[in-house]
Image: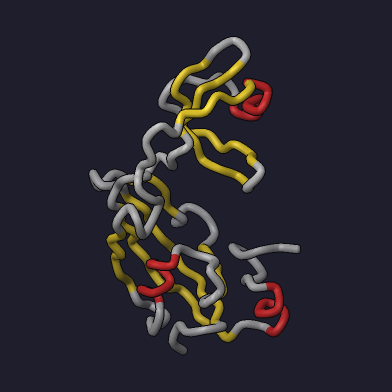
Amino acid sequence: MQIGPDTVVSFHYTLRNAAGELVETSRDSEPTLYLHGHGNVMEAIEKQMEGRSVGDKFTAVLSAAESFGEKVANSIQRVAIKYFKHAGKLVPGQAVRLNTDNGLMTVTVVKVGKFSVDVDTNHPLAGQEVSFEVEVLDVRAALAEEIQHGHAHGVGGHHH
């Protein structure tokens, strides 16, 4: 079966930054599972997955615009330190997850004060070309419930 609309895809990936350094990999955990055609992965990755089959391996090189966005100037925000209790001792340059009105966001600590933290709201990989090394492990037809919910269910996907 080939990857196309309303198929569930299981895959492993390795993400590298512009310098070729390892940023993240799924290889030391469960594979990633997504419902193709429903915006569950980056659009550029989804386009490169289209038509592929189990066993296919490829490297997707994405521009900043296709991946984590261009770097936005003047994106420093001051946030009360109480919102970082989960992150432990903060140091400048550290990437942390911050719960915002728009969901979780990865920010970079710029300055730590007694009552507040200045963060750069650009994603740490913003402005960089990145590469994803991908291996397709499984492709199956989506269940009606998955299509209705707009995402894959099961290990590596969404659990209700």
Examine the rendered structure and indicate whether residue 75 appears above or below residue 141: above
Say left or right for 95 vs 158.
left
Residue furthest right as drawn: 160
- Of residues 84 and 34, which is closer to you in this image? 84
Residue furthest bottom as drawn: 1
Figure coloring: secondary structure
- Of residues 127 and 125, which is closer to you in this image? 127
Residue at the spot x=38%, y=67% of the render?
Answer: 44
Residue 57, position as x, y percentages in the image: 32, 71
Residue at the spot x=38%, y=56% of the render?
Answer: 67
Residue furthest left as drawn: 19
Residue 160, position as x, y percentages in the image: 76, 63
Say left or right for 102 vs 2.
right
Residue at the spot x=40%, y=67% of the render?
Answer: 45
Q: How many numbered circles are shown?
A: 0
Say left or right for 34 vs 22.
right
Residue 19, position as x, y percentages in the image: 23, 44
Residue furthest top as drawn: 114
- Of residues 90 and 110, which is closer to you in this image? 110
Residue 131, position as x, y percentages in the image: 30, 56
* Residue 157: quadrant of the picture: bottom right
Residue at the spot x=62%, y=71% of the render?
Answer: 152
